[in-house]
Amino acid sequence: MKLMNLATMKNKDRLTLRLLVIAAIATLWPVALSATEPAFSSLFSDRMVLQRERPISVWGTAIPGTGLRVSLAEHVQNVRADQSGNWTAEFPALSAGGPHRLELAETDGMVRVLEDILIGEVWLCSGQSNMEYPVANLNEPWRDTAQMDSSIRLLTVEHDSSTKPLAEFGGVSGWDIATADTVSSFSAACYLFARSLQNDLEVPFGLIDASWGGSAIEAWISARGLRPHDAFRRALELNNLHDTDADKALQSFVGDWQSWWMAASDGQPGPWMTDFVDRNWPEAPRQLGDWRQWDDMRTKDFTGMIWYRKSFELNAAQAEQGAVLELGGVDEVDVTWINGKPVGAKFGWGTPRSYRVNPGVLETGTNVLAVNVYNSWAAGGLDGPPETIRLAFPDDSHVPLGEGWRFQLVIEPAGRPPMTPWSSITGVTGLFNAMIAPLSDFGVGGVLWYQGESNTGRAHDYETLLATMVDDWRERFGKQLPFIVIQLPEFGSLPDGPGDSGWARVRDAQQQVAAADPLTGLVVTVGSADPSDLHPPNKRVVGKRSAAVAHGLLLGGDVVTDGIVPLRAVLMDKEVTVHFADTGMPLFVSGAAAPSSFELCDNHGDCRYVTARLQQNRIMLDASDVAEPAEVRHAWADAPVINLYSAQGLPVSSFRLPIRSRQEIPAE
């Protein structure tokens, strides 16, 4: 037998190893192929609608370098996946019509075919719970689903949040044809808007509902949009830190929160401190739960902030470990400490809290757990039940923490505490990043926006934020994007005298933004709602008026697109005259001899109701009892009573105007 030399042996070993590697790869090849098979983005599916009269982008993923053939309505594009595995095909603008096929193929054959693609109007509907409000909740929903149009298509974006812009949705189930079943859970305002507008345009409609109940406007604005606003720079910094070091971001945020508390409470000791004395605090009910349901008159109908504290014992073996703190459900925002060290902070309506407790936080002997809960609406507090509240250790043992709590209402400091900026609906940018950014290259014909309720408690900056959001979205969807703002309706107690109103401030801000922008329209909804219902079911008037505003923006004509806009208020001889923009439609007073809900405010901010009369489409206000009238306000209440309308049936909504003297106004 001949002996092989060392070089030959090494070569054969290399060959053997190579064959083994190839064999192993071959067994995994089908899996690798299926994981990287060319595909459309999840946004594209059967039955979808693409925006008419605008270049169309289609995109997806494949193995880097893969050559692909993409075709739409007899137009063909040959593209190649880039180094990241992404590909994009661009098609020329198409006129309304269809159905078409959207095809994706490799050199060796077809990969994916999407059927029943229509070209028409694509509208993005967004906002909070009144946009989410489904058709099924309408009064007699069968009136709106008896005759369905198959050229209306629906896409619902699932709730999601991210500190960074996403290229893909976390979850969409594909486009649906509007049927009695599919529209049942879809946005009523969005669907009724499209159904009404389609009567004018006679084209297919694709509706994208990306909304989330309770969301604040700043959650829907990108970091680029918020960055110029000083009030949000710190939140954006914390978001960036959270991406790289979540623990450090939490510590930094809670440091800010504690500083807020100390400033707002005039330096009162923080109940998170281990040496804080709570022996005079009352005991919380054993079952915990919604504090409004406790047998305690102090918490009945209470909205705001409550502290919870309890102590618990640990042995040395337990204290040296890390653990997980399970708090059960909390409604709505909590900040939580153990032994004065922050362990968690989160938003959620009764959602369970589970916080990692790092080694070094727990102590042998007595430990102190402090939880601050802030609630802005309805139920609030540690929901329990007690058995779900515990400290869990890696060895599956646990220490129960459900009983023995003390509590204290916070009457002062008043106001909304800082919120974790990475939270979903109360944070910044998160909803834009996860629910809007994936649409960036998708053709959108317009936006229907129904939001503001969650900003009424801090309405002073809503005008700036709304204008910022409109500009921000136009950076994504086109400078000429029509934007329709649905104004807040009435909600709350009927006014028994002049006073400030966050709801009126938001309404006024919405009108100001619409009046300043020819491509932004306003849908007036006051007078259409039940002031005791945060979610008024009369979405038919919302849909009808939204469609009328869209008609005016898209087609022009004599449709009022900004509501009844007040221009100026002029003082002369103890009378203030309010001038309105000329819509060609005279004003009238409904059900009374004179307009109601007008106020005059002096230089000190003191306001009073005044007598008003309608004269030649102007409102004349009696200023004889106001020494130095500085401002006129109308319908300045959460739930105003309005009786001034235009001939088109639109009410004159909330507004305020500075009063100028006659000498300041040029002759007409």
Image (cartoon, rainbow, N blue to C red):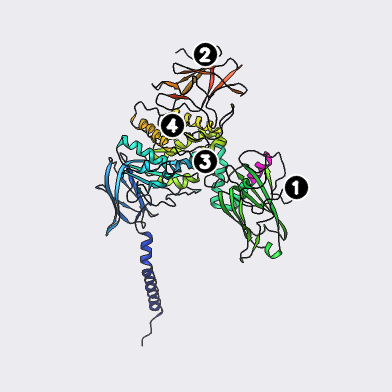
The reply to whether residue 339 is visible in this rendering is no
What residue is shown at x 43% (from left), y 39% (from top)?
Answer: 473
List the residue tagged with mark 4: 522
Q: Name the residue under label 1.
A: 280
Element type at mark 4: strand
Residue 662: which disc? Answer: 2
587 in relation to 373, above or below: above
Task: Looking at this view, name the residue that lies furthest to the left.
Answer: 74
Question: Distance of mark 1 from mark 4, alpha carbons?
Answer: 53 Å
Mark 1 vs mark 3: in front: 1
Any magenta on residue 274?
yes
Residue pictured at 36% horizontal, 56% vertical: 62
153 vs 282, left or right, is left
Report, in whole angstroms, how far the alpha carbon at label 1 lies from the one at label 3: 37 Å
Return the residue nearer the eye: 526 or 204: 526
Looking at numbered disc 1 in the image, what kind of residue is underneath it? Asn
Measure the C-alpha gap from mark 2 to mark 3.
41 Å
Amino acid type, label 4: Leu
Looking at the rendering, the stretch of residues picked out in magenta corresponds to: 255-282
The image position of residue 531, as x and y in percent, is 52, 35
Q: Mark 3 points at which residue?
A: 216
